[in-house]
Amino acid sequence: MIEKSSIDLFKQMYRIRAVEEAIASHYPEGKMRCPVHLSIGQELIPALFAETIRPTDFAVSTHRGHAHYLAKGGNLNAMIAEIYGKSTGCARGKGGSMHLIDLSVNFMGTSAIVGNSIPIGVGLALSVQIKNTDQISCVFLGDGAIEEGVFYESVNFAAVRKLPVLFICENNLYSVYSPLSVRQPAGRSIANMVKAMGIEVGIADGMDIQASKQLMKESVDRVRDTVMPFFIEFSTYRWREHCGHAFDNDLGYRTAQEFLKWQTKDPLNHLETMLSNSSPSLQNSVLGLKSTIEAEVNAAFDFAENSPFPDQREAYDGVYA
Ligand SMILES: Cc1ncc(C[n+]2csc(CCOP(=O)(O)OP(=O)(O)O)c2C)c(N)n1
Ligand SMILES: [Mg+2]
């Protein structure tokens, strides 16, 4: 029997991908005047996060943050409007794709500066400790952000102060066009290096649904129960170019074989095939879910298109002032 949880996971993953595929297809129209960093291919991790995290918990993310914002429950209309630079956007149209925020669901921000949101997430965990609540703070980061000095300061502070922070590293093997092999010594495991700094770590294949699900759940529970920092690393892969809507396999920094190897493992595709082959009624449910999500996504783009640009007089007003 197919568990309801498989359908729920499919829904989360499909929604995130549908939003980003729509961004990619509308991008050449030239109406989104900010850079976009798509995480198509990496959806399993945010989808599992969505299932596991509480609305009261905090999260921060990076330049590649659409999926994390949506997974935390961020408003879709406000995200698309933000990317269109409209006044109805989540940062009133002033921030664009790399400055997503939705305080109503404790999604506390994303940043264009690599590593910049890490100490903010740690600071949020410090606020939890001071207020003595049962929240946790989650920091999404890429493998490239591990190479920023602020990462070490932040992990050290979290370890020394015993803060309830979960570092979630999406290791997609690249920082822009540089593979790990030209950035870090051969054989180094990011998770093992972090462990040596004095916090516990976990690692999972971010294409493996069961392994990733278990790690996500256990680590969220663990941070909440032990009130200690924890670091988890998922291996994953982005399909599109580093920044923009297109593919960039022609640039030569990664091979077609490598790309295809990861694409073949796509957990969303496997889940859809598994559900669709299970029974005709489940196949219909999948089709129904997909069309409901596509209608929601189309409505968000209509909302963004039909929203006004910010008034010029607002240019220097604070977003949350
Ligand atoms: C401090 C800083 N240095 C460099 C950049 C340019 N830059 C933007 S994204 C990026 C790659 C980051 O790689 P990673 O953390 O692995 O995230 P990914 O893009 O792979 O999701 C770099 C170097 C930046 N924005 N900020
Ligand atoms: Mg990376």
Image (spheres, grey):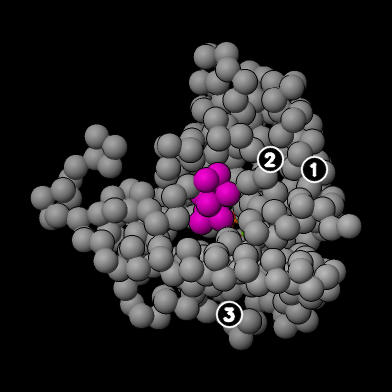
- Which is nearer the N-term, disc 3 or disc 2? 2
Q: Which residue is mark 3?
A: 248
Q: Which residue is mark 2?
A: 52
Label 3 Cα neighbours within 10 Å, binned few <14 / some 14-19 / many ≥20:
some
Image-quarter location of ligand 1: bottom right
Q: CA distance from mark 3 to mark 2?
A: 33 Å
* Residue 202 x/y as whole percent: 80, 41
Q: Is mark 1 within 8 Å of ligand 2?
A: no
Q: Amino acid at mark 3?
A: Asp
**132 vs 272, nearest the viewer:** 272
Q: Is residue 177 magenta?
A: no
Magenta residues?
Answer: 65-73
Residue depicted at x 20% and y 55%: 310
Res 209 quadrant in image:
bottom right
Residue depicted at x 61% and y 34%: 54
Q: Is mark 2 within 8 Å of ligand 1?
A: no
Q: Amino acid at mark 2?
A: Thr
Q: Secondary structure at mark 1?
A: helix
- Which is nearer the N-term, disc 2 or disc 1? 2
Q: CA distance from mark 2 to mark 1?
A: 11 Å
In the rendered view of the protein, which quadrant contains the N terminus?
A: bottom right
When the figure is inspected, residue 157 is found, relative to residue 185, above or below; the finding is: above
Q: Which residue is mark 1?
A: 215
Residue ranking furthest to the bottom = 250
* Residue 92 x/y as whole percent: 28, 50
